[in-house]
Structures are given as structure tokens and as C-alpha cells.
Image: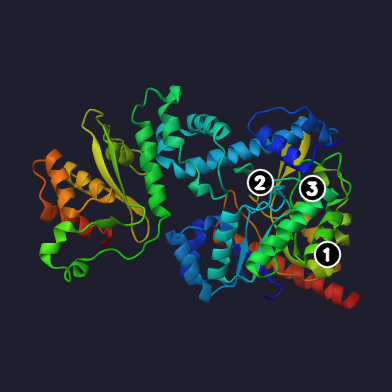
């Protein structure tokens, strides 16, 4: 996959993409939406001839203290075998406990205990798939008092110990840093050679007890602040395949493709800058 | 002493469904946004996203009761029955039964059956479009052996019975339906729900056809199923009924 921008493939756009075959570096799908043999899943498999895929999971729950659910892991592995995507990823978060699925990317305390859990689960996933997976930094609305590491320190250790890649969601960096009063520059210290992919998305500003809080809702264009941070990230870490994510209030396909073109231009501009600096 | 990870995760999952936990609250950093308000963001997101997932799986129920009522009903269900796994299209197996006992919906006695229809359509949609039995497949079986054979139904095929005209209620609740009223006393419905090549849908069945398919689904032979169908429906005729069901592509294979 060349370091260019792709888009999230969402069900309402499927027919148009199958018909028009618009140019994009890759298509990303949420694993959990394509695990059963629906007409949409059949259509996705037919698109394999035309597109590179990224399979992005949201439900493997890599931070679960009790380990990964064997049945779900098997279903995701089966999808990955059928689609042979260029990338497989999930999040630094958890959502499964006691056989119940809490539908969110729930935060972890960044402790040695949690680090052992995540590394073990990521290794289990990579062993099962027989390939490297990438772990995405989540958007956070709270931090834990007993965390002993920063999120970038924790992610660096997960990558170092498990050999996984890091998927850097630039919008999530912005959202988490604002919400938890952190400095976005902390994320620029991540090991560049572990970073495999970038995500870009829009967020919204909500009210929490009279204070603004940024919510990662993937429902609008990427904000100016996030584009600026993206430039900094690419200059520091380098060009990588970049995804435009849009999940709520889905606009016309052309809007997604337009955002992806903007990301392509930003990658080129920052990449040139990085090359000159080197 | 901070909560160990398993306890922390149990406490946070409990918080989402409405339990308060002092040690969890004490483990969360609060500032100008208090810890409780930060935790509430997760609770609201989980509940709201699962309400949305249920609305996608039960669109007809939602259309009949409206978004606000649906969300209230869905929220009560979610708090008592979180998903068992991360595939949200497979969440809601117990929703129809919940709707049946949900007192505020007591004025709509057909609502639980509409939930059963939405669920059956959802299950059919997520079932494979594997090859179906065609008349040519039967040609190789000697006619005298047919009565003793059993026939399996296609994945996702289901027979639904209701004392209400749920097919007409369903049609009236569709986005572009005319505003025609449905007479609830018009009689019940027997529907065959099945996966079609590009979607899932249903067709009305005669009483005998429904009984025939139910008996086949339970593993009875063609002869036994036909006898059972005839016992409840005096006008049931095996040959045209079988031809119609074969044409509808409801059968998977002859055993």
C-alpha cells in the first residue's frame, strides 16, 4: 500500500462504489459489520479485485483482563483469511467482561498490569492471524489516578514487546489531549518505525457539567486544528497510508473522497518538508 | 489501594448499566470536569449506541412507536440485557419477549409479534444464500421413495404465526406506505420469512402450508408433514403447495 489516503466503506455507499469504482488508495471496513454472509459481505468480496482493504476491528477487546473471546477471534480470523487485507487493526481499549459486550472503546489505566494484559492479547491475535496487527490510540474522556505511564509510553511498550504496529489516529490525539489536559507533543515521541497508518476524522464539542468536552463522533469534516497536527505528525514520523473515517451523519461519497484528496496533499506537503529536513 | 484491572473493568461495566461504585469514582481523575461527569459520557454512549443498534434491527417496531418511545423501551432492555458479543446485528434475540412484557406498550398487543418479524427478517438477511433445492434435484429420486424423504429448509427460513395481521401492519409502517388503516380484527397471519438473493423478505402462507413447513423444519418426512398439514387445513393439497414452496426457494436439500 502506498502512503496515500483511503476511505471508510460504509453500507450506504456500497452500491455506488461497486458501480463507479472511484479511485482511492484503500477501503477500510469494520470487521464486525461483515462477519456474516449478507449481500453486503458478498459485494465486498467481489470488490477485492479492484481495491486494497484494511480490516479495522472494534470488538476484539485487546485490553480485557480475561483475554480475547475465542469465538469472536475465530470469526475475525475467517474474515481476514477471505479478504486478505493489507492491514488489520483494533484499539488500545476494552469492551468485553464476563461474557457481556459493552459497546464502546473503554479506557485502560496505563499500568504494568494492563501492559501485560494488552501485550498478551495482541500476541494472541497476531499468532492467530499469522501477521502483524496495528493498535490504535483511543479517544479518551477520562484518565485513571493510578496510571503510571502516559498513553504514548504505554503504546511504545506494547509495540516493543509484541512487535505490533501502531495506528495513529490524529483526531484521537487531539481529542484525548484536550479532554485530559495533556500535550499533543507527547504523541510525537512515539517510535516512528512502529507507526503503520494514520486515521483522520471529525469530532464534536459537547458540554460536560458546563465545561466543553470533545467527542470523537466521526460525523463531520476533519477540523483545522487536526489538519495542523497531522502536518506535524507527518513531518516528525513520515508518510503513511491515511484513512478518512466517517460513521455518523454520513455525507455523499464525494465528500469522503474530497477529504481523502486533502489528506493526500497534506501527506505530500509534509513529506517533502521531511525529506528536505533529512 | 487502586482497583486491580479485573475489578476495575467489572465496576466500569456495572456503571454503564446504572450501578454506582465509590472505588471506581475514586480511580478517575476529576478536575473542572468531575470524575462522575466523565464516567457518564461512557454510560450515555453505550446506552445510546445500543438503542441505535436495536432501532436498526427493529425498524418496524421503531416506526410504529416513534423514536422517543422506542429509545425508552430499548434503554430498559439494554440495561437488563447487554450484548453477548460484539456483532451488533446479532443483538436483540430477547427483545420481542421483552416488548411483550413492557407495560407502557400494553396498548399495542401486536407489537411483540412485529418485533418477532423484524428479528426473523434480520436473521434471514444474515444467513447465507447457499444453493436451494430445484425441481431438477428431485428428478433423480424415484417417485415412490419421495413420501419417506425429509427436506431441510434454507438457512434463515422461518415460519411466523400471529393472531394479528402483522404483514399488513408491517406494510403500513414502511417509509413510503399509504396512510391506510389496518383492521386488527382482520384475522391473523402466517408468514414465511426467507433470505432472497439481495435481501430478506416474507410471503403469506396458507394455514396448511405453514403447518407443512413447520413439520418439515422439525424433521418430519414429506408424507408425515402433509398429513399434519391436512389435519389443520382441509383444503391443503400437497402437490401445488410443494410446487409453490419449491418456487419460493425455501428448501435446501432432500435427505
Q: Nearer the viewer, mark 3 or mark 2?
A: 2
| Mark earlier in primary sequence (3, 2) | 2
The quadrant of the picture occupied by the N terminus of chain B is top right
How crowded pointer 1 is (Cα within 10 Å; few <14, some 14-19, many 20+) is rated as some
Q: Quadrant of residue B139?
A: bottom left
How crowded pointer 3 is (Cα within 10 Å; few <14, some 14-19, many 20+) is rated as many
- State the residue position of label 1: A160
Q: Is residue A265 left or right of residue B139?
A: right
Most foreground residue, B162 or B108: B162
Same chain check for tags 3 and 1 = yes
| Mark earlier in primary sequence (2, 1) | 2
- State the residue position of label 2: A95
**Could you tell me if residue A251 is visible in this image?**
no
Count of numbered marks: 3
Q: Chain of mark 3?
A: A
- State the residue position of label 3: A176
Tell me the distance, in whole angstroms, between the alpha carbons under discs 3 and 1: 23 Å
**Could you tell me if residue A126 is visible in this image?**
yes
Q: What residue is drawn where x is 69% and y is 61%?
A: A124
Q: Chain of mark 1?
A: A
Q: What residue is drawn where x is 48% and y is 68%?
A: A18
Say above or below: A11 vs B114: below
Q: Secondary structure at mark 1?
A: helix
Q: Secondary structure at mark 2?
A: strand
Q: Secondary structure at mark 3?
A: helix
Amino acid at each position: 500500500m502506498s502512503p496515500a489516503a483511503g476511505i471508510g466503506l460504509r453500507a450506504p455507499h456500497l452500491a455506488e462504489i461497486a458501480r463507479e469504482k472511484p479511485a482511492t488508495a484503500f477501503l477500510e471496513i469494520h470487521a464486525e459489520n461483515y462477519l456474516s454472509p449478507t449481500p453486503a459481505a458478498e459485494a465486498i468480496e467481489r470488490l477485492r479485485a479492484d481495491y486494497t482493504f484494511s480490516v479495522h476491528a472494534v470488538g476484539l477487546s485487546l485490553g480485557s483482563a480475561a483475554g480475547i473471546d475465542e469465538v469472536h477471534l475465530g470469526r475475525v480470523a475467517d474474515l481476514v483469511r477471505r479478504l486478505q487485507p493489507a492491514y488489520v487493526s483494533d484499539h488500545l481499549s476494552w469492551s468485553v467482561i464476563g461474557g457481556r459486550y459493552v459497546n464502546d472503546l473503554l479506557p485502560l489505566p496505563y499500568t504494568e498490569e494492563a501492559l501485560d494484559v494488552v501485550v498478551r492479547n495482541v500476541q494472541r491475535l497476531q499468532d492467530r492471524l499469522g501477521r502483524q496487527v496495528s493498535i490504535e490510540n483511543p479517544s479518551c474522556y477520562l484518565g485513571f489516578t493510578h496510571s503510571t505511564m502516559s498513553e504514548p509510553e504505554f503504546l511504545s511498550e506494547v509495540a516493543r514487546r509484541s512487535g505490533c504496529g501502531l495506528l495513529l489516529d490524529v483526531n484521537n490525539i487531539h481529542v484525548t489531549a484536550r479532554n485530559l489536559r495533556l500535550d499533543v507533543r507527547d504523541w510525537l515521541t512515539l517510535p516512528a518505525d512502529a507507526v503503520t497508518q494514520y486515521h483522520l476524522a471529525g469530532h464534536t464539542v459537547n458540554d460536560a457539567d458546563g465545561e466543553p468536552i470533545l467527542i470523537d463522533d466521526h460525523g463531520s469534516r476533519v477540523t483545522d486544528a487536526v489538519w495542523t497536527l497531522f502536518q506535524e505528525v507527518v513531518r516528525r514520523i513520515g508518510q503513511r497510508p491515511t484513512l478518512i473515517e466517517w460513521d455518523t451523519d454520513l455525507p455523499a461519497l464525494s465528500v469522503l473522497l474530497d477529504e481523502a484528496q486533502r489528506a493526500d496533499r497534506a501527506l505530500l506537503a509534509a513529506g517533502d518538508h521531511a525529506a528536505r529536513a533529512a | 489501594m487502586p482497583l486491580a484491572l479485573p475489578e476495575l473493568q467489572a465496576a466500569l461495566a456495572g456503571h454503564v448499566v446504572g450501578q454506582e461504585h465509590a472505588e471506581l469514582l475514586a480511580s478517575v481523575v476529576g478536575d473542572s470536569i468531575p470524575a462522575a461527569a466523565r464516567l457518564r459520557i461512557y454510560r450515555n454512549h453505550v446506552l445510546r449506541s445500543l438503542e441505535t443498534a436495536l432501532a436498526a434491527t427493529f425498524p418496524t417496531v421503531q416506526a410504529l412507536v416513534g423514536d422517543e418511545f422506542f429509545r425508552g423501551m430499548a434503554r430498559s432492555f439494554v440495561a437488563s440485557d447487554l450484548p453477548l458479543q460484539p456483532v451488533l446485528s446479532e443483538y436483540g434475540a430477547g427483545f420481542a419477549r421483552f416488548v411483550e412484557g413492557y407495560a407502557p406498550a400494553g396498548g399495542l398487543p401486536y407489537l411483540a409479534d412485529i418485533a418477532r418479524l423484524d428479528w426473523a427478517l434480520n436473521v434471514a438477511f444474515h444467513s447465507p444464500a447457499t444453493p436451494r433445492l430445484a425441481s431438477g434435484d428431485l428428478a433423480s429420486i424415484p417417485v415412490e421413495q419421495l413420501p419417506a424423504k425429509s427436506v431441510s429448509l434454507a438457512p434463515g427460513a422461518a415460519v411466523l404465526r400471529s393472531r394479528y395481521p402483522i404483514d399488513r401492519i408491517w406494510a403500513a409502517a414502511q417509509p413510503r406506505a399509504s396512510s391506510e388503516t389496518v383492521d386488527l380484527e382482520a384475522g391473523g397471519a402466517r408468514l414465511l420469512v426467507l433470505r432472497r438473493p439481495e435481501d430478506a423478505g416474507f410471503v403469506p402462507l396458507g394455514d396448511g402450508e405453514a403447518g407443512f413447513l413447520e413439520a418439515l423444519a422439525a424433521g418430519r418426512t414429506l408424507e408425515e408433514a402433509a398429513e399434519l398439514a391436512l389435519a389443520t387445513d382441509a383444503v391443503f393439497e400437497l402437490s401445488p403447495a410443494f410446487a409453490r414452496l419449491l418456487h419460493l426457494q425455501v428448501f435446501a436439500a432432500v435427505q
